[in-house]
Amino acid sequence: MAVSSSDFPMQRTARWAIGLICVAHFFSHFYMLLLPPLLPVIADAMQTSYTQLGFGITMFSLMTGLAQAPMGILVDRLGAGWVLIAGLTLEGLAFSLLGVWPVYGAFVLFMAVAGLGNAVYHPADYAILNEVARPERMGRAFSYHTASGHLGEALAPLTVLLLASVFGWQQALFICGLLGVGVAAALYLRRDWLSSGNAGVATMRESAPAEREVTESATGTPVANPADAVMTRRQLLLSRPILMSVAFFIGLTLIGRGVTGFGVTALHEQQGFSLTLAGTLISAWLFASPLGVLVGGRIADGQGDLQKTIVACLLGIGAGIALLAWTTPGILLSGILFALCGFASGAIAPSRDMLIRSLTPAGQAGTVFGFVSTGFNLGGIIAPLLFGFLLDQGAANGVFWLVALASVLTVFTVIGVSGKPARQTSGAA
């Protein structure tokens, strides 16, 4: 189909807008892994235990989980661009202030503030992407968005450790925080590219009469009034496939956080690797992961069995990490194992999203994906406490054993994600 020359400026603007969103998402994940490589140094400087630091990191995940739904409302009412700019500014300033005020009470406070800022990315980013990306390129826009987050995770350990080795850990945090503020300033200067408008408010008003029709289509049950529709939606979210999906997301978070969040410290204490070397090995996982995302997208689009793909990747991760925990491989073999497991971890993501989509009744995508994604937040709350406790007990090797166990147990949640939840709610009125 021919494209009008007048469409080209709009397309260029869309590409730039997608690029800016990807940079913002890069920093979302960059900040998630900014502190773990520095935990031994921070614990020594603040005279705190790993469990105490784990509590501070848990506050980050807790605030993100609690604030995501309210942030979604703000996105619809104020516009996604403004919410995204405010969130990135808040998070960047919080990490800069961590470097300025290295006191445990301030650490917990600023982690909570950073978690609040981190809550904006998914509702704001997806609102903007849905508006600026062309429908025929939407999948690629989403894949770039996901890959940019993985890249942020990959660069965070190396960046902060390099800056810390040159300037000190406090100055490293201060600089990394200011980088996010700088990106927020760039977003502000190009905020017209990021406007998702306030169409969401009007859309909600206009769609209210259609809620009953959507719910009846999803559940196969006539709905007498809007209150019954709400009840039916609640039953949908409490159906076995959806709840197993939440458990699936929790398992994936335990796996990822165990390796990327505590792997550096575990390697440092278990095998005596320097923090820089341990960070480099974990970065092999982080750099391989976005490659896995891109390849996994093609696999998911190939109409194959999504569950078999996910199970194969999980078992591969479990075997690789168990080998790292059971033996003491050399540096090269450790790097290869981390890279292969990281690739498998990334390859899961597209099949994961397609699997959840296959469970979603028509008109319920926001409800289902929003509810299931709370598994990430729940896992983010549990993981620091579990892995921090293991490190405090001197069981650094237990970090990798727990990751391997989580990989195997998560297989059972994938097997449980089957059937159509809409059918299970069809008997409810």
Image (cartoon, rainbow, N blue to C red):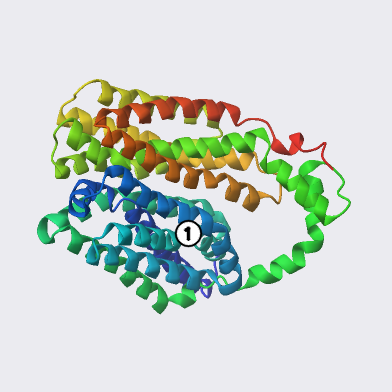
In front of the other: 266 or 104 = 104
Instruction: Measuring from the top left, give residue 79's x and y in whole percent.
Output: 55, 72
- What amino acid type should be assigned to the residue bearing mark 1? Ala
Name the foreground residue: 98 vs 238.
98
In percent of width and height, residue 61 lies at: 43, 51
Q: Where is residue 423 drawn, in percent x and y?
A: 76, 35
Residue matched to label 1: 119
With respect to residue 219, does 330 lie above or below? above
Front residue of 318/147: it is 318
Q: Which residue is located at x 43 percent, y 41 percent?
A: 382
Name the quadrant of the N terminus: bottom right
Q: Which residue appears at 58% of the width and 51% of the height?
A: 370
Q: Is residue 137 visible?
A: no
Above-or-below relation of 7 to 114? below
Left or right of 80? Residue 32 is left
Q: Residue at horizontal 39%, vertical 35%?
A: 255
Residue 113 in the image: above or below residue 197: above
Task: Tell me the element at label 1.
Answer: loop
